[in-house]
Each structure stands twice: as C-alpha cells, then as structure tokens.
Image (cartoon, rainbow, N blue to C red):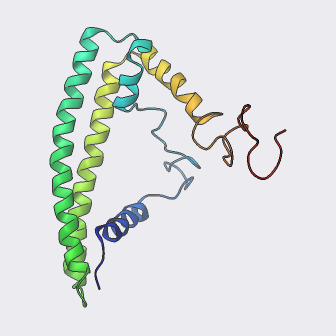
Amino acid sequence: MKLSSLVVLAFAASALHAQQPPPGGGPGGPPPGGDPLAGQIFPPEMVMKHQRALGLTDDQQKSLRAAVKEAQGEFTDLQWQQHSEVEDLRDLVQQERPDEKAALAQLDKLLKIENQIKRAQLSLALRIKHVLSPEQQQKLRTLRRPMRGPGGPGSGPGGTGGPPPQDGPPPEGGPRE
C-alpha cells in the first residue's frame, strides 16, 4: 500500500498538534479560539505592505531587509531537510509491516526540524519587533484589526465575520436584510 507525502505530513502535523495544549486549556494555554501570539508579533509581509503608513526610516528598512534575507536562507535549508526527512518517513510507513521503532525515530527527526523552523520564525518575528518603535507596533495592531471584522476572512455570503455585501445579488438562502 502506497501513502502519499500528504498523508505522512498530515500524520506528522497531527502529532505536533497533539503536543500542544488544548485551546483555552488552563493557565498558560492559548486563549479560546485564537493564537496567543497573534497580536504581539508581525509577519514581515505585513510590515512590508504598510511601510509607508508606518513611516519606516531608511535604517529600519535596511535592518528589516537584512533580517528577512538571513531568515530566508535558514528557512530554505530547513525546508530541504524537512522534505528529505518526510520522504524517509514515507518510505518507512509505506512498507507492508512498518518498523514502529524506526518510524517513530524518523518522526522525531522530522519534528526536530519543524521545531527549528518554528524557532526561526519566532526569531525573525522578534527581530522585526525590535526594529519597530512602540508607536509603529501599535499602528500595525490597528491595521490588523479590520482583517478580523467585517470584510475580513469569514465575512460576506455564507461567512460569519460580518454583514453581507451591500451591492450585487443577495446571498443564496434568502433576501438581504
């Protein structure tokens, strides 16, 4: 029986998810329904997109570019390693009688790389935050908010994030209020 890389990745992702505390799961756990770091760190794409609104100085832009460039090199190396380890895990799991000990050891290798990726992502996010002033960080939080309310993900016809659109035909299932 052949398993695709996707199945192996889903297996590895479910193992990662099982190691995380449940949402709202007590002291120190993530708040119900959200990422506990979401409001505290800023993806490089968001900073890049809003660089004018933030009023980034030339020095800030240089620092941010250098941080992103360095991280991209690290991410590329880790992705190559990750794909190799996934292939090895797939080869072990697709056998008729997989060796459990070998498969679990291979999963540990894969999880170690995924941990390195997460560390690199957080490291970049922290470096970005160090470059930004408190005012720029607050501006990013404000710019992020509209994406979570009306007009953001989950809104519109069939969504739960906001009112239906005001122009165009009414959404399926009935008239617009």
Point 37% across, 33% down: residue:
43
Where residue 42 appears, as percent x and y from the top left, is: 40, 30
Decide: is 145 above or below 100: above
Residue 109, by quadrant, is bottom left
Q: How many labels does the image show?
A: 0
Where residue 29 appears, as percent x and y from the top left, is: 50, 50
Residue 5, by quadrant, is bottom left
Decide: is 168 above or below 87: above
Decide: is 175 above or below 58: below
Residue 72, by quadrant, is top left
Where residue 85 appears, as percent x and y from the top left, is: 18, 64
Point 30% across, 77% down: residue:
3
Quadrant of the snapshot with the N terminus: bottom left
Quadrant of the snapshot with the C terminus: top right
> In the drawing, does residue 60 fall left or right of residue 177?
left
Where residue 97 appears, as percent x and y from the top left, is: 24, 90
> In the drawing, does residue 172 fall left or right of residue 76?
right
Q: Which of 148 and 107 is in front in this view?
A: 148
Taking the view exactly as shown, the residue that stands out farthest to the front is 169
Point 47% across, 23% down: residue:
140
Q: Which of 118 and 161 is in front in this view?
A: 161
Decide: is 63 above or below 5: above
Q: Nearer the viewer, residue 159 or 125?
A: 159
